[in-house]
Amino acid sequence: MARGLGRALQRAVSREGADVDLEGEGRSLANARRRQVFRYFCLRPCARIGDISRALKMSQATVRWHAWDLTENRYLISEGVSIFPAGLIDPGDVSLFGALATTGRAAVLAAAFDVPGISFQDVAPRVGLTRQSVSKVASELAEFGLVRLVDDGRFRRLYATDLLARKREANRDRAVAFEEALLRRLTDEGLAPELVRREETRLLLRFGTGAKRVLLEVPLDPYATAWKATA
């Protein structure tokens, strides 16, 4: 049922103005492409510009421009090379999300979740890395507490920990505050937001100017989505 509801939400968003620009200078989320960039950062905080460019089929210059606008208008925060939604994640986890955005990290973590105890030898072809690269990535993930490394004879095996599950639980109140702040911001910008649906991991908003309204699905659970292969 949850997957069906997710597909229904996606169909609703696609029907109602996903690619429509609203009127009004200075209203950041009035721009359709900017809404896409904002949503991607909610899915994957600290994502790299090149990855967003490929995923959204925009030029890197376009992604940078919209990320800059969203940062200037305080929808996003820029910290060094990392960009993430204001208020959605624990600031202490910026380095963790930055690591997951680095090539290979998320794929290796996903393999550890998919196949508990998977060996480095089996991870390598699965994620398209050499065994040496898998060893380096796994050690970095272990430093963050995301995986455990276990020696098993001539094999070295990976086990995902419950760290992300605990962080997801601890982030629930922050996600609610993020939602409330987003609604206030859209109201302040004269976009008259309406909360269409709220689920544990996302919300669906309708907003606009005059008779023109759009829908925006906003992910609220980056600790579950930042490392997954598909968004």
Image (spheres, rainbow, N blue to C red):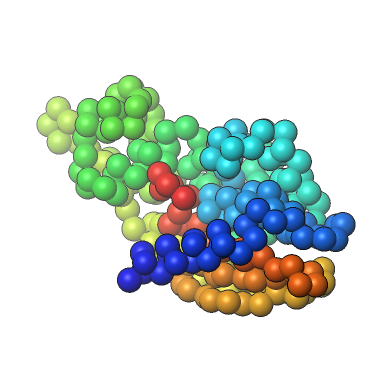
- Establish if 166 lies above or below 83: below
Q: Nearer the viewer, residue 37 or 6?
A: 6
- Establish if 29 lies above or below 138: below
Residue drawn 34% across the image and 45% down it: 110
Residue 91 visible in the snapshot: no
Q: Residue furthest right?
A: 25
- Establish if 164 lies above or below 100: below
Q: Position of residue 30 (x, y in %)?
A: 75, 59
Determine whether, in the image, residue 130 is placed left or right of residue 217.
Answer: left
Determine whether, in the image, residue 201 is placed left or right of residue 20.
Answer: left
Residue drawn 26% across the image and 48% down it: 114
Give the tally of numbered discs.
0
Q: Position of residue 184 (x, y in %)?
A: 74, 74
Q: Position of residue 176 (x, y in %)?
A: 58, 74
Determine whether, in the image, residue 182 is placed left or right of residue 12.
Answer: right
- Dividing the picture into quarters, in which one does residue 60 lie? top right
Residue drawn 80% across the image and 72% down it: 210
Q: Nearer the viewer, residue 96 or 189?
A: 189
Q: Position of residue 72 (x, y in %)?
A: 81, 51
Q: Nearer the viewer, residue 158 or 224?
A: 224
Residue drawn 17% across the image and 31% down it: 155
Residue 226 visible in the snapshot: yes
In the picture, the quarter occupied by the N terminus is bottom left
